[in-house]
Image (cartoon, rainbow, N blue to C red):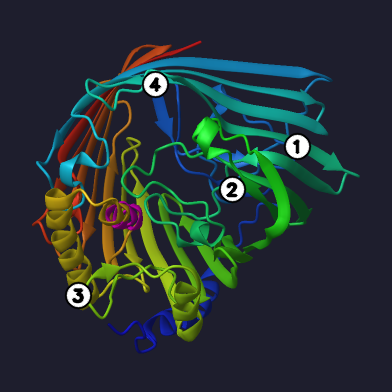
């Protein structure tokens, strides 16, 4: 199979149009934020209300009760805290799920993924921050989880998980230093964020609202007028998987051999947020590469538009191969490095998004994502043939080598593996005062398969919410979403905040 493909000129043309047209259009705008740096994060779910949370940095402290959308051009006045503040928030979440599993699908023969058709999860989460003036702050987001299922895969152990814990320091009244484990969202999209992939801050493509663990880092942020510059150091972190199974998120050791450095320059120009991102890292062990990103985010009143582009040399997606005997395998080690090094094409993944907020707080959003390094039709057909062939062999032989290959295929399918996707979402908060519905779909434009997601939150009272989250995976067996190991999944959650 040939891995090299003709260079795609469309992303370069699109980039040129974006860089020329958007600034020209923006010249007509005069509203300026006077140095206030506004960073839009992924929607944060805290209490029964779900809102787009605008996190304003550099000493501005926005409490949970003050969460709101900060509009472009709006000046947010700094709130100077008292000498010492301690903020402590908790929730207890009880959830149960039902999973309509397929019988021996190609990606999960003999249930090698150890999935259950129903189960229970209990979680205690605590989030606290300690701050002294605006100079020093420590934040943490910790969880204790207990899960159980009906079969041999039942896990009744309690796991301690560190989602975030970091120290935030104001250095010489000039820059902010953050050290520890921290979540970051640098992209502007809801479903697709190719720029976040530059820094390897990936979202769950099936559930973008899923809270991610942070990454260990040391980040220096330097504000300069209406701009800011961020420098991020990622240490090489190793976990003791045999003892802790990676559950706690606390590393066994840190090294500097394979550490990486990321940089972002963020500018407010003509009421448009423009950010350039760079990261040099080894997403494959021993193979360092350069990754570049560009984000353009602009609001015209209630209408928001964003563009994200991420580029690098050599295709990072892993391809299945056939040896001389006709057996399928995934290249590893030097063979994998040689395949990537021999590919001198430039791959540019990009996302285009538009959203609109109505007077009743309803919001619609549409996003298109081009995964330039994804499988084309022939490559995906070969991937599907491998799964079908090796799945049948595993059912007949229970060969552990085949099992490892199928598990590797599932790992690859955990991200988007085709080239063209469309996302549509609709939110109408406070329907009938207490209900917050969400509807969304991700459509694979290459094969017609799609994911449907429906969520409804019910605020029983100010400190208790009930959420029903449902997902349907629809498509033929030889399509991306049709290959998923389940047809339907429902999750019912009860959360008490205190």
Question: Dot 2: few (<14), some (14–19), or many (≥20) neighbours within 10 Å?
Answer: some
Mark 4 or 3, nearer chain start: 4
Assess whether mark 4 and mark 2 are in contact (beta carbons under 8 angstroms): no
For label 3, count other residues whose C-alpha is less than 10 Å away and answer few (under 14), some (14-19) or many (20+).
few
Q: Secondary structure at mark 1?
A: strand
Please name the residue that numbered disc 2 is placed on.
39
Query: Which x, y percent locates residue 28?
Result: 55, 69
Q: Magenta region: which residues?
A: 405-414
Q: Are marks 1 and 3 in contact (CB under 8 Å)?
A: no
Query: Is residue 258 rendered magenta in the image?
Result: no
Q: Nearer the viewer, residue 349 or 227?
A: 349
Residue that numbered label 4 is attached to: 48
Secondary structure of the residue carrying numbered label 4? loop
Relative depth, front residue between 208 and 38: 208
* Residue position marked by numbered label 3 in the rendering: 377
* The label number, if any, that marks residue 168 in the structure image: 1
Q: Under tag 2, what secondary structure?
A: strand
The N terminus - image quarter: bottom left
Q: Quadrant of residue 432?
A: top left
- Which of marks 2 and 3 precedes in the sequence? 2
Report the residue at 21% width, 61% height from top. 444
The answer to whether marks 4 and 3 mark residues whose Cβ atoms lie closer than 8 Å is: no
In 3D space, how far apart are the residues under numbered discs 3 and 2 (Cα atoms)?
A: 38 Å
Looking at the picture, tell me which residue is in the foreground, 24 or 103: 103
Write the residue at 61% across / 64% down. 281
């Amino acid at each position: 199979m040939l891995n090299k493909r003709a260079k795609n000129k469309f992303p370069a043309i699109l980039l040129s149009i974006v860089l020329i047209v958007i600034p020209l259009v923006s010249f007509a705008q005069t509203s300026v934020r006077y140095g206030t740096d506004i960073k839009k994060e992924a929607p944060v779910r805290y209490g029964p209300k779900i809102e787009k949370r605008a996190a304003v940095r550099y000493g501005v402290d926005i409490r949970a009760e003050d969460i709101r959308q900060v509009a472009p051009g709006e000046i947010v006045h700094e709130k100077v805290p008292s000498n010492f503040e301690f903020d402590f928030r908790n929730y207890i979440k009880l959830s149960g799920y039902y999973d309509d599993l397929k019988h021996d699908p190609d990606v999960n023969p003999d249930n090698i993924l150890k999935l259950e058709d129903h189960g229970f999860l209990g979680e205690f989460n605590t989030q606290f921050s300690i701050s002294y003036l605006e100079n020093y702050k420590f934040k943490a987001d910790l969880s204790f989880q207990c899960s159980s299922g009906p079969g041999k895969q039942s896990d009744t152990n309690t796991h301690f998980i560190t989602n975030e814990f970091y120290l935030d320091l104001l250095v010489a009244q000039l820059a902010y230093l953050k050290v520890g484990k921290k979540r970051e969202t640098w992209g502007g999209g809801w479903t697709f964020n190719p720029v976040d992939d530059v820094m390897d801050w990936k979202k769950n493509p099936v559930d973008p609202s899923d809270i991610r663990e942070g990454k260990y880092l040391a980040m220096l942020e330097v504000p300069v007028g209406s701009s800011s510059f961020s420098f991020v150091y990622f240490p090489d972190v190793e976990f003791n998987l045999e003892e802790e199974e990676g559950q706690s998120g606390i590393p066994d050791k840190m090294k500097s051999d394979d550490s990486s450095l990321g940089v972002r320059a963020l500018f407010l120009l003509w009421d448009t947020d423009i950010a350039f991102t760079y990261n040099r890292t080894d997403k494959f062990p021993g193979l360092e590469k350069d990754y570049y990103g560009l984000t353009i985010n602009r609001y015209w009143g209630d209408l928001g538009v964003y563009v994200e582009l991420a580029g690098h040399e050599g295709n990072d997606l892993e391809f299945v191969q056939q040896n001389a005997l006709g057996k399928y395998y995934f290249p590893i080690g030097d063979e994998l490095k040689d395949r990537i090094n021999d590919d001198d094409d430039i791959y540019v993944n990009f996302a285009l998004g538009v959203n609109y907020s109505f007077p009743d707080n309803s919001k619609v959003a549409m996003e298109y994502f081009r995964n330039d390094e994804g499988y084309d039709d022939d490559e995906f057909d070969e991937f599907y043939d491998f799964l079908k062939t090796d799945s049948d062999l595993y059912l007949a032989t229970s060969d552990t080598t085949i099992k490892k290959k199928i598990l590797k295929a599932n790992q690859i399918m955990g991200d988007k593996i085709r080239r063209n996707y469309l996302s549509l979402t609709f939110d109408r908060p406070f329907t009938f005062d207490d209900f917050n519905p969400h509807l969304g779909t991700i459509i694979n434009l290459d094969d017609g398969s799609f994911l449907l997601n429906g969520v409804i939150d019910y605020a029983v009272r100010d400190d208790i919410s009930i959420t029903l989250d449902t997902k349907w995976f629809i498509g033929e067996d030889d399509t991306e979403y049709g290959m998923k190991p389940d047809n339907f999944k429902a999750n019912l959650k009860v959360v008490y905040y205190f």
